[in-house]
Structures are given as C-alpha cells and as structure tokens.
Amino acid sequence: MNYTSSIMRKNITGQKPRVKPGSRGGRFLLKWLDKQNISHSELARTLCISRSYMHRLISGERPPTYKIAMQLENIAEIPYESWTKP
C-alpha cells in the first residue's frame, strides 16, 4: 500500500492507520495522541519533523534526537528516559 492509498483509507474509514509502538516512549506517545485526538501528522508539523520520522519514533525503529525528546517531554510530558529504556 502506498502513502496515498493510506491517506485515502484514513479519510474514507475515519480511522487512524495502525502503528505498533516499539518503545516505552512510543507507547506513551501513541496513547497521548489518541487521548488528545491529535494525528501523527499534526504532531510532526509541530515538532518540525517528517511524518515518516514520527512513524519511526512511535514504532521504535528510530530513537528521537535529544532536541525532539526534550520537545516531547515539554509537549506531551513523556519523560526523556522513556525513550532510552525498553
């Protein structure tokens, strides 16, 4: 499935694409996004990062930079340490 069809599917079904969180920080972030009703794209724009990088943060494929981790701690109250511990 390419990116366009994923977006179309989201718009048609009204559901967010499923992302499997791979780190404690990713799990916290995914819960926070759902609770705040904020899309991955909206938070990515706020943090000035790409949507693909946001997806990788949540899935645990990539750790956040120190700057991004500090921004997430300020915005979503996700402790910096949650990104470094499994």
Image (spheres, rainbow, N blue to C red):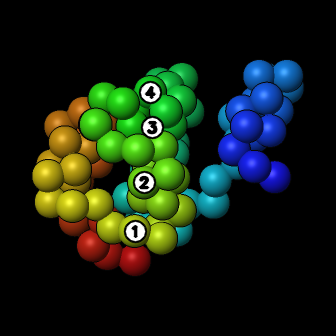
Which residue, given by chain and number where applicable, does mark 1 sit on? 62
**Residues under labels 4 and 2: Cα distance?**
13 Å
Of the residues under marks 1 and 4, which one precedes in the sequence? 4
Q: Residue at x 44, y 27 (%)?
A: 42
Which residue, given by chain and number where applicable, does mark 3 sit on? 32
Q: Residue 20 placed where, x, y %?
A: 63, 60
Of the residues under marks 1 and 2, which one precedes in the sequence? 2
Q: Residue at x 53, y 30 (%)?
A: 39
- On residue 42, which mark appears? 4
Q: Residue at x 52, y 68 (%)?
A: 22
Q: Residue 21 placed where, x, y %?
A: 55, 60
Q: Is residue 78 left or right of residue 6?
A: left
- Could you tell me if the residues under marks 1 and 2 are in contact, i.e. CB atoms within 8 Å? yes
Dot 1: what SS?
loop
Which residue, given by chain and number where applicable, does mark 2 sit on? 53
Q: Residue at x 22, y 53 (%)?
A: 69
Of the residues under marks 3 and 4, which one precedes in the sequence? 3
Q: Is residue 6 left or right of residue 45?
A: right
- Could you tell me if the residues under marks 1 and 3 are in contact, i.e. CB atoms within 8 Å? no
Dot 4: what SS?
helix
Name the residue type under label 1. Answer: Arg
Q: Residue furthest bottom?
A: 86
Q: Residue 64 placed where, x, y %?
A: 28, 60
